[in-house]
Amino acid sequence: MKISLFALTLLVFSSAQASEIDSFTKRYAIKEDASGVLNKLTNERIQKALKRANKKHPCSKKRLKKSLLKQLKGNVVGGPIEFFINGSEEHELDRIALKRRESVYNGVKFFSAPVLKLPLGSFGRIVKVGDHIVGADKFGHFFTEGLAYFEKAQKKGLKSALRWGHKTELKKFGNWTTGVYSRADQVANYGGYLFWKSIHKKNGEHGPYFSCENKKWVQVKTFDWRDFVDAGWDEGINCNSYRNKKTRRTVEANIAALEGDSESASSCPIIEEVEKCNEVVTKYSSVYKNLVAKECLN
């Protein structure tokens, strides 16, 4: 389906916070695990939410959710954790930031990835969580799109929510704006769904995070990003698809050109870490087929 220039312009500016990441260039330059810093920040924001939730209406689930949204969620995309990682200020995170011309997206044309070619488009930083390389955008996906999954699943079931995520990656949150269809984004969305589902009741290995005690909400489980982040979040393992063949060839050629750089990876999935594909397949193939890259299934 062709998109008019006017419609494309509206779409691009409505997705002004959209960003893409490069999980290949300088990947191995990141040495320090960011989970400690990110866990501290996330739990501090959760405590602020609890303080607000407990001001009125003892143990109101609605108020708890609203307070958490204010502290954790972005408007359309993004959110405070993503913005913290991408922030220009100096802090203790070991992170990598690239300009477009330094990345594997160098040479991608405007109509293939309009957001990435405009000043409002940006490249998110990458960090290490546990043993996994993750883009800043995934933390926004987790809380923001994860909530959308949760609310849609409540109304029409999980499969409907997963299909919605697939469609948005094909359109406004992926192919139409950044030129990238990201399975890792959708895995992060699904992780966020699991979090929102387990706020005040146990859901498999997650939650409950909050309990009503003496007419006040208390946090009974510390939030830890390592409980959710896995190889499925890593675009170097759970490979992307692209809007068209020209974009795919450009990106793949740029990735291959990284061969010989000891700090970078030159294939997807990354040959040195290809065993992580087994984790992705085992954990997600039974949930929804579009969460797993075909390269991991081969």
Image (tube, rainbow, N blue to C red):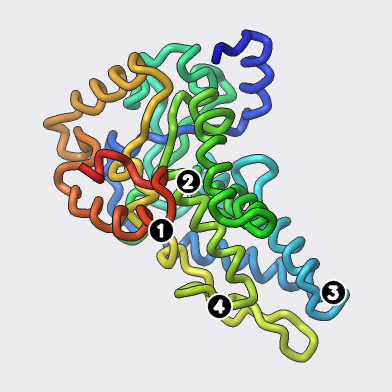
Amino acid tagged 4: Lys
Mark 4 or mark 1, which is nearer the start of the sequence? 4
Residue on which the image places disc 4:
202
Q: Secondary structure at mark 4?
A: loop
Q: Is 109 situated left or right of 200 in this image?
A: left
Q: Name the secondary structure under disc 2.
A: helix
Which residue was labeled with disc 1? 229
**For mark 3, does the 10 Å Cα neighbourhood hold few (<14), some (14 to 19), or many (20 or more) residues?**
few
Q: Quadrant of the N terminus?
A: top right
Quadrant assignment, res 18:
top right
Rendered view: 274 above or below 250 = below
Residue at the (50%, 65%) spot, across then down: 39
Disc 3 element: loop
Q: Would you say the residues marked 3 and 2 are in contact, meaning their CB atoms lie under 8 Å apart?
A: no
Which mark, residue 169? Answer: none
Residue type pointed to by label 1: Val
Label 2, label 4: how far apart the Cα atoms are:
23 Å
Nearest to viewer (mark 1 / mark 4): 4
